[in-house]
Amino acid sequence: MKKYDPQMHTAEHILNQTMVRVFGIERAFSSHLERKKSKCDYIFDRSLTHDEEKNIERQVNEQLKRHLPVEEHWLSKEVAEKNYNLKKLPEEAEDEIRIVTIGDYDVCPCIGAHVKNTSEVGEFVFVSTSYEAGVLRIRFKLNRPEVLN
């Protein structure tokens, strides 16, 4: 299992699913997750407006506040390939693929660490966005719950 910060990694899942739902795009093709600040890169055709940034931030936080359970399930690689995009998994992935579900909001193959419930993540905050050559970069941080800092 990859050693991502569990809170940040769970927030990334919610951000990715929000981008998919709002803009009909694929999940981030690249991400760099750190405890203090993270970034996700998306194939996109323009910069986000200020209103779009606020809308995405609001929607991510709405999902985090739903106290969604974060669970893992295992599927055979054959079944997983039929239902999920496995292109980000390493070539040496085992015959059993770990699928992470976040309540009724997100489901995808994943090898990283997560919290047990979205209530553990804290508040998602946009730091900045930029757009260049077909790539939208979103930088974000978390205002974490005191008990988990």
Image: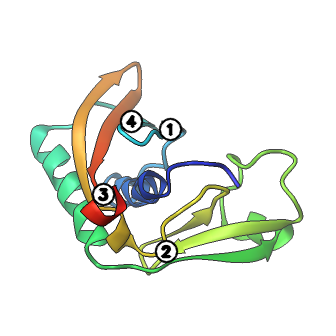
Which class describes the residues within 10 Å of circle 2: few (<14), some (14-19), or many (20+)?
some
Above or below residue 136? Residue 76 is below
What's the distance in space between the residues labelled 4 and 2, CA to CA? 31 Å
- Residue at image mark 3: 22
Spatial CA span between label 4 and label 3: 12 Å
Q: Residue 97, percent across and down? A: 77, 66
- The residue located at (18%, 59%) in the rendering is 58
Q: Tell me the residue that label 1 is attached to.
A: 31
Q: Provide the secondary structure element on which disc 3 rests.
A: helix
Q: What element carries label 1?
A: strand
Cα distance between the residues tagged 2 and 1: 21 Å
Q: How far apart are marks 1 and 3 (CA)?
A: 19 Å
Q: Where is residue 56 in the image (x, y as percent from the top left)?
A: 23, 53
Q: Which residue is identified by label 4?
A: 44
Q: Looking at the image, is 5 positioned above or below residue 58?
A: above
Looking at the image, do the residues carrying marks 2 and 1 touch, with CB atoms under 8 Å apart? no
Looking at marks 4 and 2 on the same chain, the residue that comes earlier in the sequence is marked by 4
- Is disc 1 in contact with disc 4, using a CB cutoff of under 8 Å? no
Q: Which mark is residue 116?
A: 2
Which amino acid is tagged 4?
Answer: Phe
